[in-house]
Image (cartoon, rainbow, N blue to C red):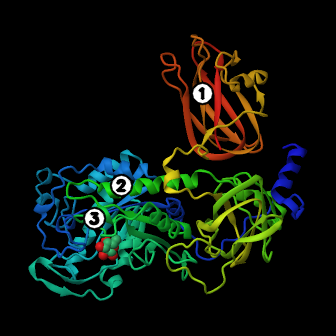
Amino acid sequence: MTARHLLTTLCLGLGFAGATVQAAAEPAPYGPLPTRQQVDWLRMEWYAFVHFGLNTYTNREWGYGDESPKMFTPGNFDAEKIVRTFKDAGMNGMIYTAKHHDGFCTWPTESTGHNITQSPWKAGQGDVVKEFASACQKHDFAFGTYLSPWDRNCAEYGRKGYLDVYYKQIEELLTQYGPIFEIWFDGAMGGDGYYGGARQNRNIGKADTYYNYEQVVRNIRRLQPDCIIWGAAERGDVTWGGSEKGFVKYPMWNTRGNKWLSLEGDTPINHRGWFWHPGQGGHVKSPEHLMDVYLSSVGRGANLILNLAPNRDGQLDAADVASLEAFGKMRKRLLAKDYARNAAVKASSVRGGDARFGGSALTDGDIESYWCPEEGAATPVAEIELPEETTFDVIRLREQIRLGQRVEAFQVEALVGGQWQSIVEPGKPGEVETQFNLRGGKGHTIGNQVLRWLKQPVTTKRLRLTITRSRAVPCISEFSLLRMPSVEEAQTVVEETDADKPLSSQGWSFSGFAAEKAHLAFDGKPETMWEIGRTPSHFVVDMKKPVMVSGFSYLPRQDGKTHGMTTRYRIELSMDGTNWQRVAEDEFGNLRANPVEQIISFPAQKARYFRFFSTAALDGVGSSVAELRIIGK
Ligand code: FUL
């Protein structure tokens, strides 16, 4: 790092704090911490719930347990089509009710005869769990399952005998269908039911004791350590959001007692209920309502599970799908452009004066880096300066939850007409939002993320974020400015997105082998090349500032010759040009026959320097690159 660069970094990172150069240690974790799995889970944001079983055929929400499996005849069930619908909408997984309270198992279980082998569908050879699990795996989509503890069919329910049945079911689901990202242990317990013909009311007492959730959780951790456990009398990782309307209360703490326990907001997309019901078409929730649900679950720091129920034919309801698609587009459009990205930030206080904890972490798009003031800084302020006057109406903040949840209240102000105006009022102790997000909500907790929809759009160049109350020194990873689209706007193509794209090479410099020719690989002209008479060889690109790099493209020579085409490459990234990290290494196959652009992506990483190695090439000793593009944002 040159002296000038060091100075620039410090000025940007520390702003008016002024500081000496020293490395400060990360702040000590505070309170209960999430597991790695809980952090990964929170980043999934939202996924689908699928209620589909015998209730689909009886127009009921809870089956009694005496329904005939013969009714289950979803002639046009197409798991892949359903999964694609979810994925296209931007969802990140699905959870299927493998067994609901009626006890009907939709996979060929050995635990009970009341299962799918008794259904005429696929001549008793069907397995809904398997079809969903395989479709999810094929489409790289997370798959989870709901297995009702309450079983109104089983004769042994309420007695010890049922536990063997239930544990067997858990084991089958967790060992025969690949990775399960989440398993639901519903809270509805005991009551009247068929119970093998007894038609009784069965009370199980304390669910935690009867099901022995302690042991259940231990078994699941053994079978699938990455599986998130929902419910299980709060012995799991996640618990109920508190309403089946989809919102969670705000402020929202992921900490309950001395445990990290996140919330999941759950709701069906259709007002008629969790299962499909005849004539439900007119009862679908509107895309605007779904946005409210989203802002009031994900936007309060929880996750959202949104139910879509297949009909008797096995297909999703057209009206449900239309609303999901419209909402999915709104969400994508909302998140597509962060108007604060790369904005300059001056922080009133920075931990140990270390640029690593400087304010610029708020706008760097890197969810891991964070702004951290000095311990004891009472109400630290980060001032954000946008390159130009910008209009927005949604503010998003994220905490670095790896270190625990800390912030109790924050305020956002904007400089409008020379006056500082409060656009998110700081929350006061005791205030609670108990319903859907109302525009103009206050700034309480942050957690994984908080989305605040302003009363009206604001146009400004300068903003101020103040952490007004925090349980420990705040660690804020992101500050974003977004714009809420209307349903209609969201239908149109998103033009300005923050999606990864080839970066402009303007101002970049090069070093390494034949460095003077390296710019020819970035000039947009395939006929001019970086070329060198040796392999392995490499060149280094200095992008002049850290960017998030997530891939690159390589265009082999297009002049009809093949020698020098790189057949093995390696990519390394660095922040300082000295310490390198390998991010990709592989082969470019079939270039001789088909010398087309090769596009490679890897997990996004912040870097200022990019190093391209040609470690093997075609026909001889040399290497060449007609065009290379670095992809990122
Ligand atoms: C509840 C159940 O009783 C409902 O039928 C539904 O499955 C919902 C997701 O959970 O507790």
- Between 143 and 535, which is closer to the camera in this rendering? 143
Residue 554: mark: 1
Label 2 is placed on what type of residue?
A: Val
Q: Earlier in the sequence, mark 1 or mark 3?
A: 3
Residue 615 x/y as whole percent? 62, 26
Label 1 is placed on what type of residue?
A: Tyr
Image quarter where the C terminus lies is top right
In the figure, residue 466 lies in which quadrant?
Answer: bottom right
Image position of 367 with respect to 531: above or below: below
Which residue has dot 3 on it? 280
Foreground mark, 1 or 3, reads 3
Mark 3 vs ligand 1: CB under 8 Å? no
Tags 1 and 3 touching, CB below 8 Å: no
Q: Is residue 141 visible in this depiction of the protein?
A: no
Mark 2 vs ligand 1: CB under 8 Å? no
Residue 139 x/y as whole percent? 39, 46
Image position of 509 with respect to 124: above or below: above
Residue 321: mark: 2
Q: CA distance from mark 3 to mark 2?
A: 12 Å
Position of 186 with respect to 344 (left or right) is left
Q: CA distance from mark 1 to mark 2?
A: 39 Å
